[in-house]
Amino acid sequence: MKKEVTKIGVLTSGGDSPGMNACIRAVVRSGLYYNLEVYGIMRGYSGMVENDIIKMESRSVANIIQRGGTILKTSRCKEFYTPEGRQQAYNNLKKLGINGLVIIGGDGSFRGAQIFSNEFDIPCIGLPGTIDKDIAGTDFTIGFDTAVNTAVEAIDKIRDTADAHDRLFIIEVMGRDAGYIALHSGIATGAENILIPEKKTDIDSIIKSLQEKEKRKKLVNLIVVAEGEEFGGVELAKMIKERMPLLETRVCILGHIQRGGTPTCFDRLIASRMGYSAVESLIEGRHNIFVGILNNKMHYIPLDEAVKKKQRISEEWLKIVKILAS
Ligand code: ADP
């Protein structure tokens, strides 16, 4: 028999992503609309373990839809990896009567939620909040679109200076062990080469293509590299320099600017839809799932599937990169 959910907690965990605030707002306001009590848990699972939990009202989430970061803050919580830490977290939730949880975070946060929900009787709903888009079962994750647009804007600017000096620029973008930010931003900025962890890097063919372009007097080249690719931007530049010492090469690591900033309209929209769906899911008795969007429809996927499966890079996309980069 399903238990009625009356008090819910919401938290943001792991790496932050733009759009998390829009998502918190949606969870809080949807919860209040359905007459639930809503609690904000500070600093991810740390707030659960340390009992840093605050009651949320409609005004608590006023004027945040357009802000990057997360008003609830986030953290990586060591204690939550231990059974004692999770027990402590459960005791704190129990004291307040919280009987439903919404976890906005990446695959690590989902792993934590899955373990917690298997141990205790509190239903957990995950919402994919990560710039890396490395969660299987959803076409998009909250923050990815903003991060990619930030990368595109920066790479466009780099192209201007690369063009002025006839240089090769190697631009390293984020994504942990996933290549989506590199792939999307690289295609959108017309990069000559895109290196991602999902595909083995062939240095010989990169050198060959650069030499061939040099012969054609195509000296401006952008290579977009994902941070999780086997060499990374700095090492790659060194290897190219050894083989082509006369080629002017610069490296730019975009870094944390990709995490911040105003979320795009798209991220605000999916964050709002997912936040609402999470509350609806708890009320309807779904548990231990995450909410994804596939073909523009909400989907409810068991948490353990998100944890087991990795997204696949489409072969077609990789073919497009090759054809368009000539
Ligand atoms: P992300 O959610 O962005 O992938 P992390 O991988 O750092 O970020 O995970 C966020 C938090 O989730 C961790 O700091 C930890 O508190 C919790 N977590 C992750 N994996 C586990 C696990 N196997 N068991 C318990 N908690 C976990």
Image (cartoon, rainbow, N blue to C red):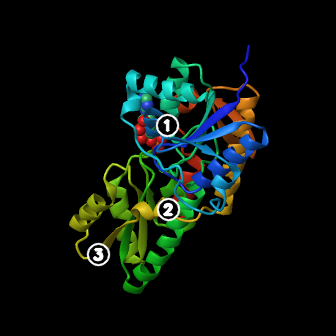
Mark 3 crowdedness (10 Å alpha carbons): few <14, some 14-19, many ≥20: some
Q: Marks 3 and 2, how far apart in space?
A: 34 Å
Task: Give the left or right position of residue 159, taking residue 129 as reference.
Answer: left
Residue 247 got which mark? 3
Does residue 186 appear in this view? Answer: yes
For label 1, being within 8 Å of ligand 1 is answered: yes
x and y percentages locating residue 240 in the rendered image: 28, 64
x and y percentages locating residue 6 in the rendered image: 71, 30
Mark 1, secondary structure of its residue: helix
Mark 2, secondary structure of its residue: loop
Pointer 1 residue? 109
Q: Marks 1 and 2, how far apart in space?
A: 20 Å
Q: Residue furthest top?
A: 1
Q: How many marks?
A: 3
Does residue 326 appear in this view? Answer: no
Q: Quadrant of ligand 1?
A: top left
